[in-house]
Image: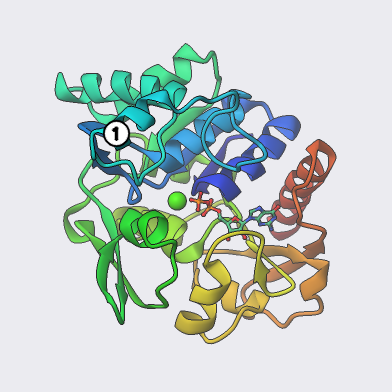
Amino acid sequence: MKIAVLSGGVGGARFLRGLTSVVDSREMTIIGNVADDLEILGLHVSPDLDSVLYALAGLSDEERGWGRADESWNALATVAELSGDAWFKLGDRDIGLHLVRTQMLSEGATLTEATARLVAAYGLGFELLPATNDPLRTFLETAAGTFPFQTWFVERGHRDEVDAVHYAGAPDATPSPGVVEAIAGAALIVITPSNPYVSIGPILAVSAIRDALAARDAPCVAVSPLIGGQAVKGPADRMLTRLAGGTTPAHVAGCYPGLIDALVYDEADAPAELPQDVRGLVTRTLMSDDGARRRLAQAVLDAGAAVT
Ligand code: GDP
Ligand code: CA
């Protein structure tokens, strides 16, 4: 059964680990967010694609929640000594990957090609596609100014409340090769428990991707990133409160109007009233270990089967 998955970084990657334990990863096409990407220290960094890659290659740091396990920080220490851009935390092992990617891009490869090489090098069976190879970047409008995503998120610690989200480059962005085909050819489409505004939103801001999803034949199942109305980590709850008017499952479903057929949400948020065209499936959604991740992935498959 072919599955297309729209994914952000850490929440998406956690979910995908569960999904690979219940489906053959060769059946999976992961469409990743690239609007968090940045150029720093001459490197092209794709944090969300890398979170997925590291998690599924078994290389991610579970405790920290991002980057690689068994990491060291010598290069960054030198950057700081030299008063370089040390605010974006890049570990030594992580930098190695960025060097390879950046070289490929500078030699003319697309991000699709560079990403495929990394997936193949780690011996992984799934397809990982950047949503687009065109420049697409998230900007956050706040009372303190309008900031690029990583400036708002990392440098300023996402302390500024967000008044609006912009996806620069979206009007001209086209899906990367294979994205529309993966959505159209899937038997199930999944939206991971990722931030609707800054992880899934930019993917859907590419109009041809949104159109392909709206025209789907297969069921689309989303997983809520909130438990008891709160984000497990990060600003998703504060953003929903401010931009959607609340943090119930209905508010999460409202981020994907006409685009999902089912929402899997936590028992801490039940019972919930959902939009008429969205079926609810209640389960425990905290992905604390392998068993919890596998059960959540199975719930998503069940939700898909229930609306087919
Ligand atoms: P980022 O791109 O690295 O910020 O990650 P994502 O956007 O993919 O995921 C961030 C979201 O994951 C946050 O809103 C969290 O609430 C959510 N998340 C993290 N762990 C869990 C979990 O165990 N269960 C659920 N339901 N959501 C989670
Ligand atoms: Ca992200």
Answer above or below: position of 2 versus 72. below
Question: Dividing the image into 4 quarters, which one contains the C terminus?
Answer: bottom right
Quarter of the rendered structure image containing ligand 1: bottom right
Give the camera-side residue of 286 and 159.
Answer: 159
Q: Residue furthest front?
A: 81
Q: Position of residue 208 (x, y in %)?
A: 30, 54
Q: Position of residue 259 (x, y in %)?
A: 50, 65
What colour scheme does the image use? Answer: rainbow
Total residue callouts:
1
Q: Secondary structure at mark 1?
A: helix
Q: Residue at x 29, y 77 (%)?
A: 144
Q: Residue at x 51, y 47 (%)?
A: 7
Question: Dividing the image into 4 quarters, which one contains the N terminus?
Answer: top right
One can see residue 152 in this view: yes
Label 1 packing within 10 angstroms: few (<14), some (14-19), many (20+): few
Q: Position of residue 77 (x, y in %)?
A: 37, 31
- Label 1 CB-ligand 1 distance < 8 A: no
Q: Residue furthest bottom?
A: 245
